[in-house]
Image (cartoon, rainbow, N blue to C red):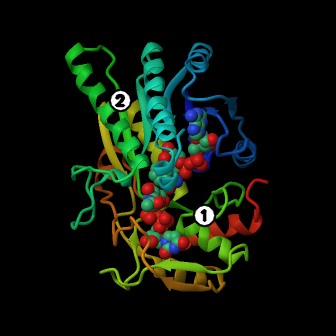
Amino acid sequence: MKILVTGGAGYIGSHTCVELLNAGFDVFVLDNLSNSKTESLRRVEIITGKPVTFVQGDVRDRECLKAIFKAHEITAVIHFAGLKAVGESCEQPLNYYDNNVYGSIVLAQEMEKANIKKLVFSSSATVYKESAVQPLTEDMPLGTTNPYGASKLMVEDIFRDLEVADKLNNHSLPWSITLLRYFNPVGAHESGLIGEDPNGVPNNLMPFISQVAIGKLGQLSIFGDDYPTIDGTGVRDYIHVVDLAKGHVKAVQAMLNGLTGVNAINLGSGQGLSVLQLVEAFESENNIAIKRKIVGRRAGDIAEYFGSAKKAKKLINWQTELDVNAMVRDSWYWQSKNPNGYE
Ligand code: NAD
Ligand code: UD1
């Protein structure tokens, strides 16, 4: 069974390709390489010993999608392709809506024409409205504060409308769409062959810590220690990227086994970790001191959020298996083996 993976050369996509191949699926990757290199896919082939079919193309390119759907029997699509930097989305909103929203519309239209109606979409925990109640459950109010988050929520809404339309039109083949709301993906494949390869200075915590550890960056700035949390630093729900990748395989399998409709599902661990807890785990697991200082809060940050993992267990039989030690160990192994990423 062949799965089309848009954005499959990227960080989460490449790890998902490994898990799909390990689970016996064939993988077809469509990626425009705007934020990745084909080297990641070459390494997916090394890890799995199986081939990956790759086409360099854009998800907004209808003709490209038509040609793929005509030439290949695609059973389901996992849609990672998109832009993901919050700050950049505020500077270039049109580019974000074009890639993330228009891209998803074109994909769904071409899937519908080809009668392929199983889709997994990369959503984000960023679609939740700030909440005093934790953990976040899938039925909690939604709301966003930047164009990146808005683009994810718009696509979720568009896909929810497809479910309504299916009922109105009494379609014999209804859509089955899983909206996976990721919490904070970190880590890398245990082989050290694939991992996160951010451009420039990382915005996110784990790649920043890894680059301090390898000496590329002088020290970590911890953004605030006066939050109402366990130790005053921000709390997030970190999730190992391999667990995340397996969640996509489970979603595809659940849809093949009859899960229908549009289902939003958190992919998180159900637990929060503070910045200091993550830094200290990195230090003790890898035996490396991370130079750090406390600075002011980062604009737009919130104190704490983590997701309930109950719906994922119930609907797609998924839960995290890898703990924080695996996250920090695998992040460091990838960074130390590939100091300059895929270059
Ligand atoms: P990534 O940038 O590593 O991967 C995205 C891939 O999509 C890249 O290979 C890029 O070249 C490709 N791409 C971008 N626009 C494209 C287009 N128009 N056509 C074809 N290919 C295109 O990012 P990632 O971290 O692997 O994230 C994957 C998805 O998960 C994204 O949709 C992102 O918004 C979402 N997500 C990521 C995180 C995170 O922290 N990494 C959290 C929540 C959600
Ligand atoms: C960010 C994105 C979010 C995305 C998520 C994915 C923003 C505003 N939000 O969230 O949309 O889904 O990444 O991983 O960009 N921290 C430091 N020092 C650093 C970097 C981070 O102290 O150099 C702290 C932050 O204040 C936060 C925690 O580490 O408390 C995690 O930060 P980060 O990795 O950027 O993730 P989020 O802020 O959760």
Q: Is residue 58 left or right of residue 298?
A: right
Residue at (67%, 60%) from the top-left corner? Answer: 200
Residue 219 vs 302, above or below: the answer is below
* Type of amino acid at the residue the image marks with label 1: Pro
Q: Is residue 238 visible?
A: no
Q: Position of residue 245 (x, y in %)?
A: 52, 49
Residue at (60%, 63%) from the top-left corner? Answer: 202
Residue at (30%, 25%) from the top-left corner? Answer: 162
Q: Position of residue 340 (x, y in %)?
A: 76, 61
Q: Position of residue 276 (x, y in %)?
A: 47, 82
Q: Nearer the viewer, mark 1 or mark 2?
A: 1
Residue 25 vs 288, above or below: the answer is above
Q: Nearer the viewer, residue 296 or 263?
A: 296
Displayed quadrant of residue 136: bottom left
* Type of amino acid at the residue the image marks with label 2: Ser
Q: Separation of disc 1 and disc 2 at Cα?
A: 35 Å
Q: Is mark 1 within 8 Å of ligand 2?
A: yes
- Label 1, residues with CA under 10 Å away: few <14, some 14-19, many ≥20: some
CB-based contact (under 8 Å), mark 1 and mark 2: no
Q: Quadrant of the N terminus?
A: top right
Q: Which residue is the site of mark 1?
A: 202
Q: Is residue 306 left or right of residue 325?
A: left
Q: Is residue 334 visible?
A: yes
Q: Earlier in the sequence, mark 1 or mark 2?
A: 2
**Is disc 1 placed on a helix, strand or loop?**
loop
Q: Is residue 67 left or right of residue 43?
A: left
Displayed quadrant of residue 61: top right
